Image: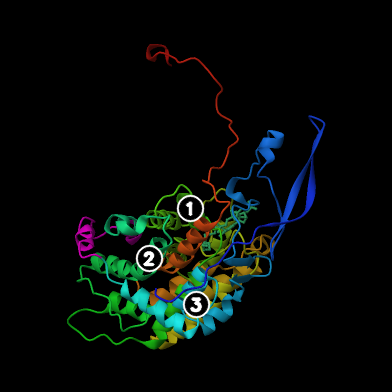
Amino acid sequence: MDMPIPQTKLADPKECGHVTLIDHANDKQYELPVLEGSEGPNVIDVQKLYRDTGYFTYDPGYTSTGSCNSQLTFIDGEKGILRHRGYAIEELAEKSDYLEVCFLLLYGELPTAAQKAEFGREITYHTMVHEQLQYFYRGFRRDAHPMAVMVGVVGALSAFYHESTDIHDLEKRRLATHQLIAKMPTLAAMTYKYSIGQPFIYPRNDLPYSENFLYMTFSVPSEEYKINPVLSRAMDRIFILHADHEQNASTSTVRIAGSSGANPFACIAAGIASLWGPAHGGANQAVLAMLREIGSKDRIPEFIKRAKDKDDPFRLMGFGHRVYKNYDPRAAILRESTHEVLDEVGVKDEPLLDLAIELERIALEDDYFVERKLFPNVDFYSGITLKAMGFPESMFTPLFALGRTAGWIAQWKEMIKDPHQRIGRPRQLFTGPTLRPFVPIEKRS
Ligand code: CMC
């Protein structure tokens, strides 16, 4: 970009007190600093814990562990609050657009009109992908899961755009960031086209971001494609709602991959791999599979019973969240969009939507779900909306990845600039065998 763009600087964490750790076994006492941020719970600084005490902390799943200092996204899970750089997700979804939210996440402020125009031009400029990438696609089976293809092609960007992999050069970092946001829709659309055997459609740079994505996905060279503004608005909103969500599994994967100095394309490919799992981004596809398996309203109690049974691995997909112990604000927004999209495409009665609403109603009244604060999450309604828009279920998680790219790359950028950043390297509690002599093969039983 030609014009100077705002730079963000991480604030140094402020110390606001101490907690005392009493080691009764060794009759010792340690003072641990407590740090405060601008919002949210204070944290106990355990960075020097091992050096000073000889102890590690133990926290599988990192339920109580802050892994970084960040200024991007704030979540209050108890109250159902999600904000990016201080702006409420409800306002962003209503009044902004995805590219503005990308700018906000990357550069800390909503863009001025001039910045927005220039950022849009810059992203547009990078929408095409290297022609050779087409041949890379052809190495995949047509029936490969789109997420498998996305992991491959996004990782391969580091081979096609090698000049952008120098993470120590600010301009190259910026270039890689913009290339990823620009090329992700092209790659996702190509993935879809490849899976159905239709020709790849080149981007049209006169179209806004989400419209261009729908055009590349649904148009064919032989016919004129008319973009439906209700659907492109819904698409843009879905991208906004998925743009960032602080230190979730895939974002933490991106950060930890990047902490070793790996290039941004490789890090985002790692994030895509992590997102694929059904407990994370794969849940949107799993929700529809579950609704179909339930089949009819009269079978809901049977599935609720299964979800509560600890001996049954079945879980209600699209319910529960590590952080939200309240209605996921993204699900509330999407619930509205689902109705708008269904009205627009003329689906008067979508049986899966009726089923979803009934399932939600029953689950929200059930003691098991109420006690555990298990509410619908973003994936509960996104699948129904995307299905109505014409996407096959296997594309749901790639669309999540497309939207989340903004957050992944903004978090990566923030980490690279953090003066306190070190390689991510958790410790462990070892419970395996201690030293024992090697047993020759003839003596093994
Ligand atoms: N159905 C039935 N029981 C559940 C569910 C569910 N969907 N989610 C959590 N529980 C129970 C769980 O069995 C546990 O019960 P208990 O205390 O009796 O052992 C309790 O609720 C707490 O669950 P947890 O597994 O300790 O919670 P977690 O924070 O480790 O897991 C989760 C969060 C999202 C992985 C989980 O709720 C889940 O598997 N949900 C279904 C998958 C899903 O919808 N994922 C999308 C998440 S939102 C999009 C994203 O960010 O990726």
Mark pair 1, 2: CA separation = 22 Å
Give the quadrant of the C terminus: top left
**Mark 1 to mark 3 CA distance (whole Å):** 36 Å
| Amino acid on which disc 1 is placed | Thr
- Along the line of sight, the residue nearer the viewer: 196 or 302: 196
Q: In the displayed structure, does residue 91 sit left or right of residue 277?
A: right
Q: Which residues are magenta?
A: 130-150
Packing grade of label 3 (10 A; few <14, some 14-19, many >=20) is few
Q: Residue at horizontal 43%, vertical 55%?
A: 168
| 314 is higher (above) or lower (below) than 174 | above
First reached walking from the N terminus: tag 3 or tag 2: 2
Please name the residue shown 60% across and 58% down the image: 322
- On screen, residue 414 above or below 98: above
Q: Which residue is mark 1?
A: 253
Asked whether residue 350 appears in the rendered view, the answer is: no
Helix, strand or loop under label 2: helix
